[in-house]
Image: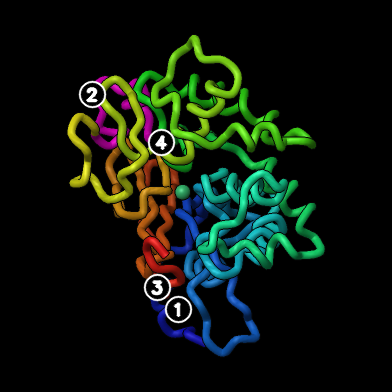
Amino acid sequence: MAKAPLMSVRMAISKKSIQFLLVSKHVTVPDWRCARLRCGFEAFALTLDFSPSRDQLVLLGDLVNRGPDSLAVLRRLQALGDAAQCLLGNHDLHALAVACGVRPAHTSDTLHELLAAPDAAQLLDWLRWRELAIVKDGILMVHAGVLPSWDTTKVIALSAAIMPAIRQKDSKNFFQSMYGNAPAAWSEDLQGQARQRVIINALTRLRFCSASGEMEFATKEGTGAAPAGYMPWFDVPGRLTSNTTIAFGHWSTLGLVNRPNLIALDTGCVWGGCLSAMQVDGGRRELIQVKCEQSQKPNA
Ligand SMILES: [Mn+2]
């Protein structure tokens, strides 16, 4: 097992009480019977000296379908109980949509083992009870982004309003209507499925939007690829959440962002980058990264 590098990272972290950790995505539980320790959640937990009885882990979504072992990831996270708070990402919603039969699996999906597991129904039920947005110690956490006209209270209210549709026993209608890029912008007048779609798209898929909050979903590259008239959602002037620290994942081509009011943690581990966590202890932050093996190729 690759114990030496883990221990050296571990030694660099002071033994203090960790209030909570933010982990970007693609948590892969290694098989301990394997001689070779893959980068994954267990390795990460060791690296962080994570203790479920003392620490709080917040995962920023895309728990599944971004690596080879989604089934073990869900089992492990569920077993952590309240020590792990998990947000829903677009891939998690995709898994739920595939599971209820309203979407075909993509050829690049890595969900087969999860969907075929004897405890699949129970695990997917657990998944649908995760959150779309939370505030913890003053940090707003979402998978992808928020629209400029929403303040933090609004984000939490919109997220809470949509959860019953995801959690209802027969959620087929919701998942059927969830897909689509329109409407591109938020309006208080939106109702029903169109309203739900804007909320879901902003919280789980957003990268670029215009100054007026019109979302753009075609561009998946970094900030330099912003189409004319669009900018990263967090750079929109006058954004109502600008005084709140926001932590998010999703944007693997953005790379790490660690500003006083912004923490972007998807550093592309699925493509062979790092799995990143931010240890937050009061006002202190400490970045912890573990290099990962590539498990998927871009556009595969
Ligand atoms: Mn995502």
Find the distance from the CA under tag 1 to the CA under tag 2. Answer: 44 Å
Q: Residue 237, labelled with which disc?
A: 2
Residue at mark 1: 7
Q: Is residue 144 above or below residue 95?
A: above
Residue at 31%, 54% in the rendered image? 253
Residue at 57%, 34% in the rendered image? 178
Residue neighbourhood size for the residue with mark 3, other residues' Cα within 10 Å, grouped as few (<14), some (14–19), many (≥20): some
Residue at mark 4: 145
Q: Nearer the viewer, mark 1 or mark 4?
A: 4
Q: Looking at the figure, which quarter contains the C terminus?
A: bottom left
For the residue pair 259 and 229, the one nearer the viewer reads as 229
Q: Tell me, yes or no, if residue 49 can be seen here.
A: no
Residue at mark 3: 9
Q: What range of the chain is rendered magenta?
A: 231-246
Q: Residue 34, labelled with which disc?
A: none
Find the distance from the CA under tag 1 to the CA under tag 3. Answer: 5 Å
Q: Dot 4 lies on which element?
A: loop
Q: Nearer the viewer, mark 3 or mark 4?
A: 4
Q: Dot 3 lies on which element?
A: helix
Mark 1 or mark 2, which has the lower sequence index?
1
Residue neighbourhood size for the residue with mark 2, other residues' Cα within 10 Å, grouped as few (<14), some (14–19), many (≥20): few
Q: Nearer the viewer, mark 1 or mark 2?
A: 2
- The answer to the question of whether label 2 and label 3 lie on touching residues, with beta carbons closer than 8 A, is no
Find the distance from the CA under tag 4 to the CA under tag 2. Answer: 15 Å
**Badge count:** 4
The amino acid marked with disc number 1 is Met
Find the distance from the CA under tag 3 to the CA under tag 4. Answer: 31 Å
The amino acid marked with disc number 2 is Pro
Q: Position of residue 202 (x, y in %)?
A: 44, 32
Q: Residue furthest top?
A: 189
